[in-house]
Image (cartoon, rainbow, N blue to C red):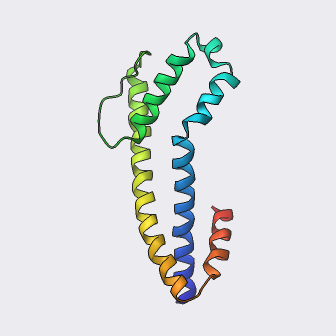
């Protein structure tokens, strides 16, 4: 029974790590600002660097924000299919947020239990779970 609980906690802890990495990467705007220049997006798109940043910031904020508002880019027109796409992407991020919060709470509980029982075996199992996932 102890081994099964250890495996379950390790999977939950792995989900927390993965969701944290996704949230960090998506929210790390500097990475995308770097890509604007590196990939020569202003020349390829015909938009200014400022317009690209403004629209990019809007897309990220829209996807991460809890408020359910209509998708409307500041300076680029969106098709109806584009708006639907971003609503779907936003829903995925909202689900990811819930998964993150649930796995955070369960991981804290699991960490406390494992630390109190002086069990570090879960770290090995977590690393294996991350590799498998």
Q: Is residue 117 left or right of residue 69?
A: right
Q: Is residue 37 above or below residue 90?
A: above
At horizontal 53% and vertical 83% (from top left) the residue drawn is 114
Q: Quarter of the image holding residue 93?
A: top left
Q: Which of the pair 43/4 is nearer the observer?
A: 43
Q: What x and y, as percent, mark residue 77?
A: 41, 15
Q: Quarter of the image holding residue 127?
A: bottom right
Residue that extends furthest to the top in the rendered view of this protein: 46
At horizontal 62% and vertical 24% (from top left) the residue drawn is 36
> Quadrant of the image for the C terminus?
bottom right
Q: Is residue 104 above or below residue 23?
A: below
Q: Quarter of the image holding residue 74?
A: top left
Q: What x and y, as percent, mark residue 8?
A: 52, 76
Q: Which of the pair 20/83 is nearer the observer?
A: 20
Q: What x and y, as percent, mark residue 1?
A: 52, 90
At horizontal 63% and vertical 19% (from top left) the residue drawn is 41
Total marks in image: 0
Q: What x and y, as percent, mark residue 84?
A: 38, 30
Q: Is residue 103 left or right of residue 117?
A: left
């Amino acid at each position: 029974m102890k081994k099964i609980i250890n495996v379950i906690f390790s999977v939950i802890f792995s989900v927390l790590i993965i969701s944290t990495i996704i949230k960090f990467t998506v929210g790390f705007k500097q990475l995308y600002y770097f890509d604007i220049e590196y990939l020569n997006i202003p020349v390829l798109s015909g938009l200014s660097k400022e317009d690209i940043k403004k629209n990019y910031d809007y897309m990220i904020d829209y996807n991460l924000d809890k408020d359910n508002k209509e998708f409307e880019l500041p300076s680029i027109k969106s098709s109806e299919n584009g708006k639907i796409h971003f609503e779907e992407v936003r829903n995925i991020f909202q689900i990811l947020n819930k998964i993150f919060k649930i796995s955070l709470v369960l991981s804290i509980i699991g960490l406390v239990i494992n630390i109190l029982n002086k069990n570090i075996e879960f770290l090995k199992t977590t690393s294996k779970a991350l590799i498998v996932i």
